[in-house]
Amino acid sequence: QVQLVESGGGLVQAGGSLRLSCAASGRAFSRSAMGWFRQAPGKEREFVASISWSGGSTAYADSVKGRFTISRDNAKNTVYLQMNSLNPEDTAVYYCAASPPYVGRYDYWGQGTQVTVSS
């Protein structure tokens, strides 16, 4: 079991930055791949970024590549999403998710944190 709590969302002007955090509890965290997803009003939830359990491998959606950085600190049971050069199209509820080892899917989800980017 993994429990996830996101924080760090808020209102920011276009061009600004935010750092989201996802605090995890549960023994499986350090062995789980982690991901960030987002859902804008009226749209499907979409993949943003992912990171392997060791932090050695990351992946990004094309829309955020070069602007967002995912990282993790297994000693703190926390995953981060640094978001720079934000634009109004980044406005969404952001969710973190955990993919336990050998499962191959994201089984655990947080409640989400709202990010609003004003133009």
Image (spheres, grey):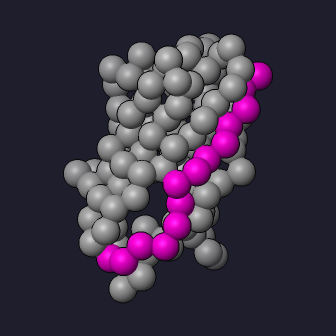
For the question of whether residue 63 can be seen, the reply is no
Relative image position of residue 49 (x, y in whole percent): 42, 43
Between residues 53 and 46, which one lies in front from this camera angle?
A: 53
The residue segment tinted magenta is: 1-14
Residue 46 lies, with reference to residue 4, above or below; the image says below
The quarter of the image holding the N terminus is: top right
For the question of whether residue 110 can be seen, the reply is yes
Residue 52 lies, with reference to residue 86, above or below; the image says above
* Numbered-mark total: 0
Left or right of 51 on screen, residue 99: right
Between residues 72 and 36, which one lies in front from this camera angle?
A: 72
Left or right of 14 on screen, residue 27: right
Relative image position of residue 93 (x, y in whole percent): 59, 62
Between residues 11 and 81, which one lies in front from this camera angle?
A: 11
Left or right of 56 on screen, residue 44: right
Identify the residue shown where x is 34% and y is 25%. Answer: 57
Relative image position of residue 27 (x, y in whole percent): 68, 14
> Seen from this angle, which residue lies furthest left?
66
> Seen from this angle, which residue lies furthest bottom?
119
Q: Main secondary structure of the magenta part?
A: strand
Q: Is residue 30 magenta?
A: no
Identify the residue shown where x is 36% and y is 77%. Answer: 13
Identify the residue shown where x is 34% and y is 62%. Answer: 17
Between residues 84 and 108, which one lies in front from this camera angle?
A: 84
Identify the residue shown where x is 59% and y is 65%. Answer: 114
Residue 71 lies, with reference to residue 104, above or below; the image says below
The quarter of the image holding the C terminus is: bottom left
Relative image position of residue 67 (x, y in whole percent): 27, 55
